[in-house]
Image (spheres, rainbow, N blue to C red):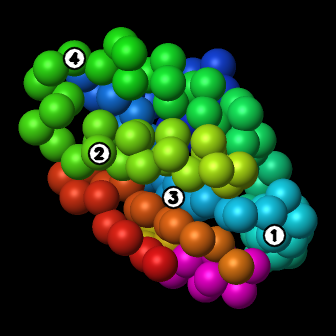
Amino acid sequence: MALKRMSKEDMPLSFGAFNPVGHIVIGFDEPAEAEQAVQSLLDAGFDPEDIVRYSAEEGASEMERRLASASGAAEFGTEVRLMRRYKQLADEGCCWLVVFAPEPAQARRVAEIAREAGACIAERYGRLVIEDLI
């Protein structure tokens, strides 16, 4: 099954929990860091459609909404734990990028760019595992 890019209007879910397989969720303390990462991603050949941006307010609101609708079955995985962490960071002012990077080489490049831009968290969502990149 081919993976597709997420958008704000079409967020990938599993049992109601945020689960963007093939994407990397990156958090930044400062919007300027996120913008630096966006420019570096574009320079590295990623398409604008590969990058979904969330302000701290958008991220907090979205995670709050998703946490309220996640099923009890979602509690067994790491998705809900990460959603709580994302909500906490967003409440503290963290902004977010969600980058479509389904191939290992793409994921390595995204992780490198995230580190260089000063990301505070980066999680790669695979089919079975969520990998901490930072």
The earlier-in-sequence mark between 4 and 3 is 3
Image location (x, y in percent) of residue 37? 78, 70
Q: In this view, does 110 lie to the left or right of 123?
A: right
Mark closer to the observer (4, 2): 2
Q: How far apart are marks 1 and 3 (CA)?
A: 16 Å
Q: Is residue 52 above or below residue 63?
A: below
Q: In this view, does 44 lie above or below 11?
A: below
Residue type, label 2: Arg
Residue under pointer 2: 81
> In the rendered image, which quarter contains the N terminus?
top left
Residue under pointer 4: 71
Image location (x, y in percent) of residue 77? 17, 42
The earlier-in-sequence mark between 1 and 2 is 1
Label ID, residue 94: none
User: Which element carries disc 4, helix, strand or loop?
Assistant: loop
Splitting the image into 4 quarters, where does residue 81 fall? top left
Q: Is residue 26 above or below residue 63?
A: below
Region rendered in magenta: 108-117
Residue at 23%, 58% (x, y): give it. Answer: 129
